[in-house]
């Protein structure tokens, strides 16, 4: 599959001076001869948004500055809003980034903000598809958010842990705990053997905490009964609960023993089947504890009840079923496209229908509103499918930097892709080629390495979605080795001047670096 072009890395010191501009306006003291002109790779860009309150707050403005620093990318743009990210719709439409990061203190986050981010993500142009991959950089305190952004090395996921609904096959090692049978665990050993052990309910909570603290998984996968403040382990039996105490994630056993989670390694946490874990309604919310004491560098969870579960389990399928194809942010992005396309199949009007804001547990009221607005006379199975999809379209929250790359090791790719743009002819040609014969678990999709202005489609398989930065072949479900399918469409690259003048003002750089905590100063010098 075609990948994005390599990012041009800028000199570290100059990146710091430019990146810390949010923390303090840069004084122009350099000579003209010191100017450096840099142009990033096409479509390797990011927009940072932040409230004026956080932009003026010590700690959070340094986090925003670090985003600029560690991206080291002259495509990074920064935008400040007063009350809502929706204020930035027009300016973001003009830059149309690939990634968007909201830097926010935890008290600024709530269900309304999450809904506005989903609206913003779909609102930059006239099509119903998401326009960028987005994430929220936050934490119980700004130091927690800083830890997330300074984690830059890509993560190849080889060790996984969580509940037993996780398939252990794609991983070199795995340790999962069953929520339907008391004390049962599944362990995949480095030699490939899979060992199933039985026990008692009392063993489950200590086992999960030990898995987090000692096993050091790259991925933690969870589902089950939960709220913003706890995760109650076990469906058919009680095994204790995870709670937040003093900001720390704690496993509480059946006899009341407290087992603190202290997991230090970078990881992704995918709460595919947990209600409400992605919502933040106070400083002791579970989401903040995952980002802090569980050291989740990226976390994906529901801001409402899981209900039909299309967003969470769909993301899991994109992320896990074709190992190494997509990172976590891309899995969320493409699952969202597929979900919206399924809404379009029911009724195109549903793709842009906005019923307003609903609290995390107001799904019954949401259903009544949809019935009143759209569903009268609709067959009940169709209505229920539309209801579940529409709720899930706006319910998932992604925490962390969406451009940080965390993915499974690739094993046996079923297809590859190429993308060729003939600027003179004004045509783009995307080709899929089969490698191994097997049914596809998700529709083959290609991220274009550039954003394009679209014209007419010349040729494409039925059901192909062609957008300004991706192509999805929704009805291609298998390819024989060597077999090709092709989409050809009119397109011209949307080129923008992203050239930035960087001033080598070393005293200013050092002054800005000195404002960071000591552990981070050496990282940005």
Image (tube, grey):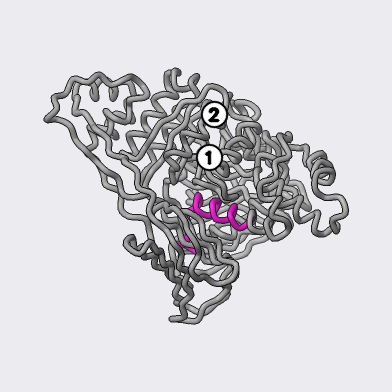
22 displayed left or right of 232:
left
Q: Position of residue 145 (x, y in %)?
A: 46, 32
Judged by its main secondary structure, the magenta piece is helix
On whether residue 335 falls in the magenta region, the answer is yes
- Out of 430 and 6, give the one closest to the viewer: 430
Q: Point out the tag, 1 or 2, that comes first from the N-terminus.
A: 2
133 vs 144: above or below: below
Q: Which residues are magenta?
A: 323-339
Task: Give residue 157's mark.
Answer: none
237 vs 28: above or below: below
- Inspect this view and state whether residue 260 appears: no
Q: Position of residue 360 (x, y in %)?
A: 72, 37
Q: Which residue is mark 2?
A: 87
The answer to which image quadrant residue 114 occupies is top right
Q: Position of residue 437 (x, y in %)?
A: 51, 79
Q: Which residue is mark 1?
A: 399
- Inspect this view and state whether residue 51 appears: yes
Callout 1 crowding tier (Cα within 10 Å): few <14, some 14–19, many ≥20: many
């Amino acid at each position: 599959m075609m990948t994005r072009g390599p990012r041009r890395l800028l000199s570290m010191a100059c990146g710091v001076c430019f990146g810390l501009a949010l923390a303090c306006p840069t004084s122009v003291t350099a000579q003209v001869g010191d100017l450096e002109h840099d142009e990033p790779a096409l479509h390797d860009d990011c927009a940072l948004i932040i409230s004026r309150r956080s932009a003026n707050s010590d700690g959070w403005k340094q986090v925003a500055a670090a985003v600029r620093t560690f991206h080291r990318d002259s495509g990074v743009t920064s935008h400040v809003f007063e009350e809502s990210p929706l204020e930035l719709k027009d300016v973001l439409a003009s830059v149309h980034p690939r990634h968007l990061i909201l830097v926010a203190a935890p008290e600024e986050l709530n269900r309304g903000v999450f809904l506005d981010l989903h609206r913003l993500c779909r609102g930059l142009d006239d099509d119903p598809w998401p326009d960028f991959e987005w994430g929220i950089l936050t934490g119980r305190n700004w130091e927690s958010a800083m830890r997330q952004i300074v984690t830059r090395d890509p993560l190849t996921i080889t060790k996984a842990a969580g509940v037993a609904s996780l398939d252990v096959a794609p991983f070199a090692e795995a340790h999962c705990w069953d929520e339907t049978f008391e004390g049962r665990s599944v362990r995949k050993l480095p030699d490939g053997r899979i060992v199933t052990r039985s026990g008692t309910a009392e063993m489950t909570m200590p086992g999960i905490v030990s898995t987090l603290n000692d096993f050091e998984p790259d991925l933690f996968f969870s589902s089950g009964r939960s709220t913003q403040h706890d995760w109650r382990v076990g469906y058919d039996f009680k095994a204790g609960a995870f709670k937040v105490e003093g900001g720390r994630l704690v496993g509480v056993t059946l006899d009341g023993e407290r087992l603190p989670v202290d997991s230090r390694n970078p990881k992704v946490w995918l709460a595919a089947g947990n209600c409400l874990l992605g919502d933040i309604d106070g400083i002791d919310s579970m989401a903040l504890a995952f980002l802090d004491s569980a050291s989740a560098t990226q976390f994906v969870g529901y801001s409402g009840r899981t209900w039909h579960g299309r967003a969470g389990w769909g993301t899991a399928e994109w992320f896990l079923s074709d190992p190494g194809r997509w990172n976590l942010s891309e899995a969320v992005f493409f699952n969202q496209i597929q979900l919206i396309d399924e809404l379009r199949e029911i009724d195109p009007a549903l793709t842009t229908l906005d019923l307003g804001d609903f609290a995390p547990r107001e799904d019954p009221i949401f259903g009544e509103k949809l019935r009143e607005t759209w569903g009268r006379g609709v067959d009940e199975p169709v209505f229920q499918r539309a209801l579940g999809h529409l709720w899930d379209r706006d319910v998932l929250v992604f925490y962390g930097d969406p451009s940080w790359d965390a993915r499974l090791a690739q094993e046996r790719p079923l297809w590859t892709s190429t993308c060729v743009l003939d600027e003179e002819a004004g045509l783009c040609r995307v080709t899929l080629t089969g490698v191994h014969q097997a049914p596809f678990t998700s529709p083959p999709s290609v991220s274009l390495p550039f954003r394009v202005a679209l014209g007419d489609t010349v040729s494409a398989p039925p059901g192909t979605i062609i957008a300004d930065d991706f192509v999805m072949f929704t009805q291609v479900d298998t390819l024989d080795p060597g077999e090709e399918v092709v989409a050809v469409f009119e397109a011209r690259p949307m080129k923008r001047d992203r050239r930035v003048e960087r001033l080598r003002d070393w005293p200013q750089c050092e002054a800005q670096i000195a404002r960071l905590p000591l552990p981070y100063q050496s990282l940005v010098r």
